[in-house]
Amino acid sequence: MRSDLPSGQDRENEDEDRDYRRDDHYDVRRGPYSQDKEHVRILSILYYVWGGLGVFVGLFPLIYVMIGAMLLSMPTPPPGGPPVPEAQIAWLMIGLGAGLSLFFLVLAALALYTGYNLSRKKRYMFCFVDACICCIQIPLGTILGVFTIVVLARPGVKELFDHSPTEARLAPEE
């Protein structure tokens, strides 16, 4: 028997209006409110992992930047020989590599920031929009995005985001 929950006799003696499902020490497997908290926590961890993988993937296109820089550093052919379009190819490779790397790193940064916001239960709309953006990253990003949309659409999860401490401080007093 858990020591943090009152025994059956204590429950009968206490006020019947108290809802034990809303306790902070409540068992996650038994109530939807705590289950929502647990699902948001798991999603935040998955977004941290996804963002870390995104950073790793975002570094691979830098190989093209290095190859382009090597092509630019090669000696030029002697005059009178056939023209070689190495400079144009090199700049194309540098631009393509840098652009792809920047794209993947921005997606990774968005995922990491979404994981942070999910763990703090802040910026509901940002998390929802990033879940939609995550859906274009087939196949794993699509799975993560769809599960995030499903979890964020629950009314209990919206309440978690609505009652975060920072929003409570910013709410106007009546």
Image (cartoon, rainbow, N blue to C red):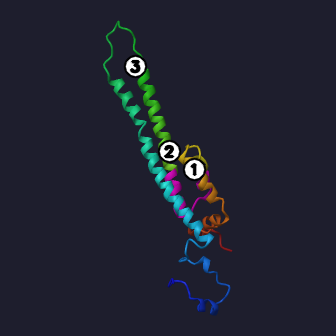
Q: Which is more toward the observer, 1 or 137?
A: 1
Q: Mark 3 or mark 2: which comes first in sequence?
A: 3
The residue positioned 52% from the left and 61% from the top of the image is 42
Can you give x and y, in whole percent of width and height, for residue 3 in the image? 50, 85
- Residue 66 visible in the current orientation: yes
Query: What segment carries the magenta color?
Result: 111-130
Cα–Cα gap, marks 2 and 1: 20 Å
Residue reaching furthest front?
A: 1
Rendered position, 107 above or below 87: below
Can you give x and y, in whole percent of width and height, for residue 21 in the image? 61, 77
State which quadrant residue 147 falls in: bottom right
Kind of residue indicated by mark 1: Ile
Rendered position, 14 above or below 92: below
**Viewer-side label of 1, 3:** 1
Say which mark, if any, is on residue 143: 1
**Viewer-side label of 2, 1:** 1
Q: Dots 2 and 1: beta carbons under 8 Å? A: no
Cα–Cα gap, marks 3 and 2: 30 Å
Say if the magenta span includes residue 128. yes
Question: What residue is disc 2 on?
Answer: 106
- What quarter of the picture does the C terminus occupy? bottom right
Say if the magenta span includes residue 58. no
Can you give x and y, in whole percent of width and height, for residue 23 in the image? 57, 78
Cα–Cα gap, marks 1 and 3: 42 Å
Q: Which is more toward the observer, 171 or 44?
A: 44
Question: What residue is disc 3 on?
Answer: 86
Can you give x and y, in whole percent of width and height, for residue 159 in the image? 64, 67
State which quadrant residue 76 falls in: top left
